[in-house]
Image (spheres, helix red, strand yellow):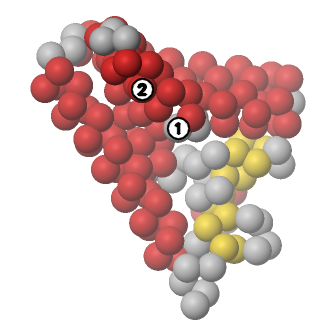
Amino acid sequence: MAEIASNESNGAVAGGLRTMLRLEGLTLFVGMTLLYAVWGGSWWIYAVLFLAPDLSFAGYLSGPRVGAIVYNAAHSYMAPVTLMVTGFAMAAPLTLSIAMIWMAHIGIDRALGYGLKYADGFTFTHLGRIGRAAKA
């Protein structure tokens, strides 16, 4: 039972459920990247926009609470899924391309263990601690 339970001491998911969430991220990354390839998108645009969500790190210049809010807004599925639905509804190829790239970015971040952030600091995520603190 502890395998699927949340780690109550830090709010991070643990065990098999953590692995499942990371595999979901990998699936999203691979799926969106393959869809982008089939779509015939420019790999130059993919490379440039793939890193764009990480500009949200700048929110941490205003402190961990603001940083977590800004980072989470850029790394939540809500905006890119809304963008994708809008792209389909309006038959807008550029909008769809941006949505695919954004979701691929979120997917690889989750696969690598970079989860949504808590206000305690950048290293506190819903997938567990990251960085040097996680190894200690």
Residue pictured at 63% horizontal, 79% vertical: 5
Quadrant position of the C terminus in the picture: bottom right
Residue pictured at 55% horizontal, 79% vertical: 4
| Above/below status of 17 relative to 2 | above
Cβ–Cβ under 8 Å for marks 1 and 2: no
Residue pictured at 64% horizontal, 23% vertical: 56
| Quarter occupied by residue 12 | bottom right
Residue that label 2 marks? 85
Secondary structure under tag 1 reads: loop
Q: Amino acid at mark 1?
A: Tyr
| Above/below status of 24 relative to 105 | below
Whether residue 99 can be seen here: no
| Quarter occupied by residue 30 | top left
How far is disc 1 from disc 2 in space, using C-alphas?
A: 12 Å
- The image position of residue 57, as x and y in percent, is 66, 26
Residue that label 1 marks? 77
Q: Amino acid at mark 2?
A: Val
The tag earlier along the polypeptide, 1 or 2, is 1
Whether residue 24 can be seen here: yes
Q: How many marks?
A: 2
- The image position of residue 104, as x and y in percent, is 37, 34
| Quarter occupied by residue 23 | bottom left
- The image position of residue 133, as x and y in percent, is 69, 57
- The image position of residue 44, as x and y in percent, is 27, 10
Left or right of 77, for residue 97: left
Secondary structure under tag 2 reads: helix
20 and 48: which is toward the camera = 20
Mark closer to the observer (1, 2):
2
Estimate how packed mark 1 is, as few (under 14), some (14 to 19) or many (20 or more) residues with alpha carbons within 10 Å.
Answer: some
Estimate how packed mark 2 is, as few (under 14), some (14 to 19) or many (20 or more) residues with alpha carbons within 10 Å.
Answer: some
Outermost residue, front direction?
A: 89
Residue pictured at 58% horizontal, 72% vertical: 14
